[in-house]
């Protein structure tokens, strides 16, 4: 297992799982959507997705209360998990459309 660079925004969903980025790895929008899909294929429910706006002039990320998806805790029955992850995907797509560029995903078991 490697070390997570806390100053980096990760573009590869595989890094989330291989580096154990659960709950603190900064992910790009596209990587976040892929993590949601990969979690579903692994039988995992998304527990939280937090969106951030990147201020390019400072490199700082601004947390936004209007960009938080609160999901379920694992394990869940199959249909509940699928619906939960569909809501996570939809919520994240809305946040992306609203200008959020960086996300932190949490999967609670």
Image (tube, grey):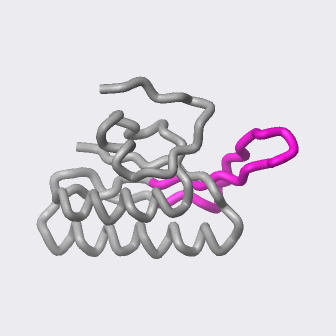
Q: Which percent across, then down, holds residue 81?
A: 22, 66
Task: Count the marks.
Answer: 0
* Quadrant that contains the C terminus: top left
Which quarter of the figure has residue 70?
A: bottom left
Percent position of residue 25, x then y: 48, 39
Q: Nearer the viewer, residue 3 or 60?
A: 3
Residue beneath the point at 54% across and 43% down = 26
> Where are the magenta residues, as a range?
49-69
Judged left or right of residue 88, residue 51 is right
Q: Nearer the viewer, residue 45 or 13?
A: 13
Question: Is 105 covered by the magenta stretch?
Answer: no
Assess whether residue 63 is covered by the magenta stretch: yes
Q: Is residue 52 above or below residue 8?
A: below
Which residue in the rendered view is the most extreme toward the left? 77
Residue depicted at x 34% and y 48%: 14
Tell me the quarter of the picture where residue 76 sits: bottom left
In this picture, is 107 found above or below 85? Answer: above
Q: Main secondary structure of the magenta part?
A: strand
x and y percentages locating residue 72 in the rendered image: 30, 57
Query: Residue 84 at x, y = what percent?
Result: 31, 68
- The residue sitting at the right extreme is 57
Q: Residue at x 33, y 35 (%)?
A: 20
Quadrant including the N terminus:
top left
């Amino acid at each position: 297992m490697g070390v997570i660079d806390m100053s980096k925004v990760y573009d590869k969903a595989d890094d989330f799982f291989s580096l154990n980025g659960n709950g603190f790895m900064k992910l790009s929008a596209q990587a976040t959507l892929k993590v949601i899909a990969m979690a579903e294929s692994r039988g995992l429910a998304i527990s939280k997705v937090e969106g951030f706006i990147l201020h390019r002039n400072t490199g700082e990320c601004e947390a936004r209360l209007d960009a938080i998806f609160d999901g379920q805790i694992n394990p869940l029955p199959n249909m509940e998990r699928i619906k939960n992850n569909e809501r996570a995907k939809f919520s994240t797509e809305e946040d992306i459309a609203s200008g959020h560029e960086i996300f932190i995903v949490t999967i609670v078991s």
